[in-house]
Amino acid sequence: QVQLVESGGGLVQPGGSLRLSCTASGSLFRFYAMDWYRQAPGNQRELVAGILSGGSTNYADSVKGRFTISRDNAKNTVYLQMNNLKPEDTAVYYCHTRRSLSDYWGQGTQVTVSS
């Protein structure tokens, strides 16, 4: 039903910045919450940030003050601006949304923070 495509990952040095994008299919994007999750090898997938249809946001404690989630409903796109990146931010980042009882995930984009 919903296809999510992430982009913007890459290799950056500690202290650097990246902006991730996730574009969704469909015409009802503006009514649904969107989230960013991440998963490092050997770790659980964890919620990084979420944004509601009205624009309210929430963040994991580990990224508060460094990451900002936003959305552009006209473009069916959610963004994750990541500043002051740390090696522990290295992971595959996934965008996510829920429709009733179904969860939808993007393919993931790799973020590597290393000197």
Image (cartoon, rainbow, N blue to C red):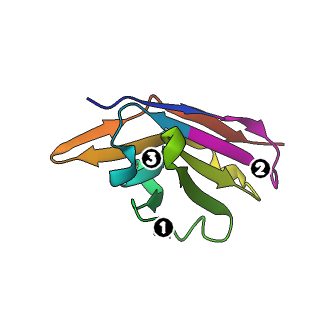
**Circle 2 residue:** 17
Location of residue 112 with respect to 14 vertically, above or below? above
Residue appearing at x 84%, y 42% in the figure: 115
**Circle 1 residue:** 57
The amino acid on which the numbered mark 1 sits, given as a three-letter code, is Thr
* In the image, residue 13 lies in the stretch drawn in magenta: yes
All told, the count of numbered labels is: 3
**Circle 3 residue:** 43
State the SS at label 3. Answer: loop
The amino acid on which the numbered mark 2 sits, given as a three-letter code, is Ser
Q: Nearer the viewer, mark 3 or mark 2?
A: 2
Graded by Cα atoms within 10 Å as few (under 14), some (14 to 19) or many (20 or more), the crowding at tag 3 reads few
Q: Is residue 67 left or right of residue 102?
A: right
State the SS at label 2. Answer: loop
Q: What separation in Å lies between label 3 and label 2 (alpha carbons)?
A: 23 Å
State the SS at label 1. Answer: strand
Q: What separation in Å lies between label 3 and label 1 (alpha carbons)?
A: 24 Å
Q: What separation in Å lies between label 1 and label 2 (alpha carbons)?
A: 20 Å
Give the percent coordinates (x, y) of residue 57. 48, 67
Give the percent coordinates (x, y) of residue 2. 32, 32
Location of residue 90 with respect to 56 vertically, above or below? above
Residue 40 visible somewhere in the drawing: no
Q: Residues in magenta?
A: 8-21
